[in-house]
Image (cartoon, rainbow, N blue to C red):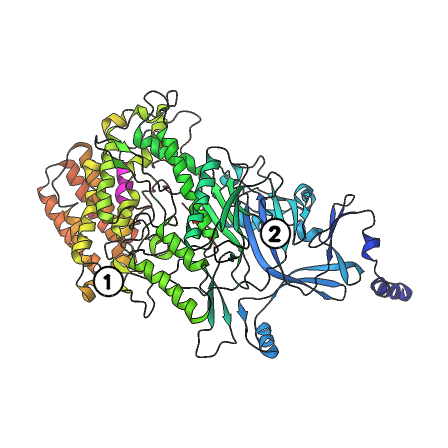
Amino acid sequence: MSRLLLFIFLVPSLVFSQKISTIEEKTSGLKKYPGFFNFYWDENTGKIWLEIDKTDTEILYNSSLPAGLGSNDIGLDRGKLGNSMVVKFSRTGRKLMLIQPNYDYRAVNGDGPEKKAVEQSFAQSIMWGFTIEAESNGRLLVDATDFLVRDAVGAGSTIKRMRQGSYSFDKTRSSIYLPQTKNFPFNTEIESTITLTGGDDAGRFVRSVTPSAEAITLRVHHSFVQLPDNNYRPRVFDARSGFIPTSYYDYSTPVTEPINKQFIIRHRLQKKNASGEVVKPIVYYIDNGTPEPIRSALFDGAKWWNQAFEAAGFKNGFQVQILPDTADPMDIRYNMVNWVHRSTRGWSYGAAVVDPRTGEIIKGNVTLGSLRVRQDYLIASGLLAPFANGVPADNKMLQMAVARLRQLSAHEIGHTLGLMHNYAASVTNRASVMDYPHPTVKLDQKGEITLADAYDDKIGDWDKAAITWGYGDFGSGAEETSQLNKVLTDAAGKGLQFISDRDARAPGGLHPQAHLWDNGADAVTELNDVMKIRSKALAQFGINNIRTGVPMAMLEEALVPVYLFHRYQVEAATKLVGGMNYTYALRGDGQTPLKPLSRTEQLRALNAVIDCFDPAKLELPKSILSLIPPRPAGAENSAELFSKRTGLAFDAMSPAETAVDLPLSFLFTNDRLTRLVQYEAISEGLSLRDMLSTLIDRTWKTPRKTGMQKLIQFQTEQVLLTYLLAASTSEESSFQARATVLQKTKELKSYIEQQLKTATDNSYAAHLQLALERMKSPDKAKPSVHSTIPPGAPIGCEDEYPLTFSER
């Protein structure tokens, strides 16, 4: 027994004390792929042996998803970028660690001990540990297969987070994918096929896109890339610029200066001479799997950006090409515009691989969902009712949809050039493709709907100013600072504004000119115009909105975007209530930081919104209701349709309920209610009591309607009551806001009680009694749960700010 124990203890020591093989001996007979990191393919074992000749040298590592799941609701799209990080290989004995330094905390100008103090104060991350299997002249060989064949993009956790099932990585069904495994002088690209198994609890999003929900097979791509040289000069972030920031904490900063350093993300672009010729242009590649006419639209829209770079003084500094058939779109060297298919229409994305040390963009990566164009075609078809004699020869619907794709291509590329959204651009003659554009629809001289000017056909003035600021060459020091500031103050002097996501997306937003999907210089005027378009489209809506041979029930798909055509413009108008003009002003730049809207402006917007509650505008004509039967077998209900309380039959009341609920959901946000109370005291603007009185007076206290309009009026009043009751009990509003809502609700209760005493119409009396009964339990009122609006924007989830932006 003692000899056996001695043998057990000695064998590991003997093994590790033996001299390891040379790389040449270990890889004899294997296929060598020379390049940035040499690697070797073992056909017999399916292994990749990676040769490391750059220890303790920082490189860029990126994972991505070249073959995705196909469900935009989950978000694992073809072409999706994973994490990008600076890493280095570091040796300890027979172990080789892949370490990610912590670049969020630095001591840029510190000496050795100061840098070390910061490094030791914050954690690093060891991403992987390898065993060194061979060595030759300082070059190390490791088995990298387990690192490469794994769920590096976190697909399993993403599926679980979306509540679509519990899946785990199955090594037995995963392997290296050799066709897309390649090596180049400055980047090593290795791909693997991975399979996730499980699926006993698979959700419908997974089941709808997989052959067998028990096994999800994807592909993961790994890029090892040489980091850029030190000749790139970062540009300090300016909140007025519209550029996406990247930041870190510099602990070598004097106490008198800010410790948080912010720089913009952008590509490297350098002039070769005074004429503006560039050392190396920025080149974007259009996915060669994109069909026509979409390919040409994406190509043309992408080229718009050269207008901005020309304005910034660069000659052919931005170029567009079709991806060669021999190229890999996941190759880190290619800025890509990917055309991606999903099960339903979804978001498009503009993402970037960024050097975290400096903010330099290494790769721009655009993902365009292919079904979005069909939604635009549907909107155009709903507006034009064009199918009286088949598809019209000029096909105005396709022309509009293709025009939208040009703008979308430019928009998403803009993100990958470093630009944020600019939702205040539509008020100054379409000043930026970084806005979300609603189609500009007009009535011609004959009163007919025209889409001739639906979308712009060029880059905007704000885009030119932003690119000039972000990429322009202004020297250095004080002169550069002065010139950069001048670019932005000149833009502001021309009326160009910049307001981005947080301000515009919030339901309780308050900027009067920063909205998603709105048009025009004035939200109220545009709302009135949009309602005229909607009225015209509904008046002519009928069988000509679908092709011959299509089930009549499918008219509902075309009806939804027509009935709700005003949805985004009415949202824009609601944000003037309790609104305020403001800018991202800096001290000394001459801009006015903020200016509350007048009571008159706010009341005008509120009344325009309430005008949209008119039962005459919300009632669907009998000519439409008589055309929509229950859906046939094989045509299921979906989120794209109005909700129903009528079983299989089309619900004539649901659209009106939805159309009222939406603007009320914006008017009754807790922050808006609280803001109205404060603004009344500060600026004598519109008060919360004013808003509530106007809403009640123009619904509950208006003359009674008849027929279907009476039912819509009752419904609107009950929806408003829901919001009043919920607001009176919400702990998220200020005390005074809740007190004001409660007071107005009690006044309404007294009015209803008086009306009930004299009511002769049984249906009106029942309506009043229901309201009084509901007032007994205000805590049970839950807005919006009874009225889910069909999605106007694409369906799915957005990636996180700041390095990925999405387009609806």
- Judging depth in this view, the residue of 584 and 556 nearest the camera is 584
Residue 647 seen anywhere in this rendered image of the structure: no
Residue 550 placement: quadrant: top left
Q: Which residue is mark 2?
A: 152
Q: How dense is the environment of label 1, judged by Cα within 10 Å: few (below 14), some, or many (20 and up)?
A: few
Residue 356 seen anywhere in this rendered image of the structure: yes
Residue 663 position within the rendered picture, expressed as x and y whole percent measured from the top left: 27, 47
Q: CA distance from mark 1 to mark 2?
A: 49 Å
What secondary structure is marked by label 1? strand
Q: How dense is the environment of label 2, judged by Cα within 10 Å: few (below 14), some, or many (20 and up)?
A: some
Highlighted magenta segment, given as a residue range: 648-661
Q: Which mark is first along the chain, 2 or 1?
A: 2
Q: Which residue is mark 1?
A: 595
Q: Is residue 429 left or right of residue 239?
A: left
Residue 403 position within the rendered picture, expressed as x and y whole percent measured from the top left: 39, 38
Quadrant where the image shows the N terminus:
bottom right
Residue 344 position within the rendered picture, expressed as x and y whole percent measured from the top left: 46, 37
Of circles 1 and 2, the one toward us is 1
